Image (cartoon, helix red, strand yellow):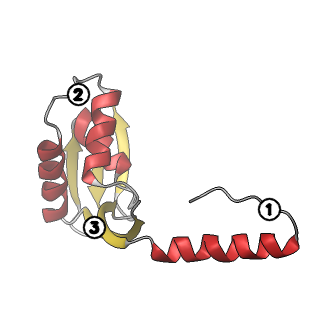
Amino acid sequence: MTKKIIRDKNDIKKSIIMDSWEKKLKPKMMIKCPLIRKDVISSKVGQELLLYDPKTERLHVLNETAAFIWKMANGRHQVGEIAKNIKKTFSLPLKTAVELDVHQIITKLKKKGLLTYQEVNHVQG
């Protein structure tokens, strides 16, 4: 967005119109973000997170890393963002390949029916 010099009310109106046009012109794309099922009950025990699925009446145990992923699976974070936060939180070197591991954990949780993906509009640029 470019800076504009506003001199009077007409300039303010023009500025608002230009801002709305710029927003419309930016390309949008749908991204998938993992989203946990709201009815799954979770309880932290030490470094692990216990998940109880009331639909299947099964208990699942997540290690510290999987628990971190579970907490970030709120429908607003992409796999890449979750991986980046894992590196930061666990003080891992930037070159550490974490995305594939995050994707695999999310895939396992999805196969067990504990989470799904939510599509979210993402404005680029």
Determine the CA span between mark 3 and mark 1: 44 Å
Front disc: 3 or 1: 1
- Asked which quadrant contains residue 94, the reply is top left
Front disc: 1 or 2: 1
Q: Which kind of residue does numbered mark 2 sit on?
A: Leu
Q: Is residue 105 visible?
A: yes
Q: Position of residue 100 (x, y in %)?
A: 11, 46
Determine the residue positioned at 13% across, 43% down. 101
User: For the residue labelled by badge 1, is the local secondary structure a helix, a strand or a loop?
Assistant: loop
Instruction: Name the residue beneath numbered marker 3.
Output: 117
Which comes before the other along the chain, label 3 or label 1? 1
Instruction: Name the residue beneath numbered marker 2.
Output: 94
User: For the residue labelled by badge 3, is the local secondary structure a helix, a strand or a loop?
Assistant: strand
Is the C terminus in the top left, top right, bottom left or bottom right quadrant? Answer: bottom left
Which comes before the other along the chain, label 3 or label 2? 2
Determine the residue positioned at 15% across, 29% down. 96
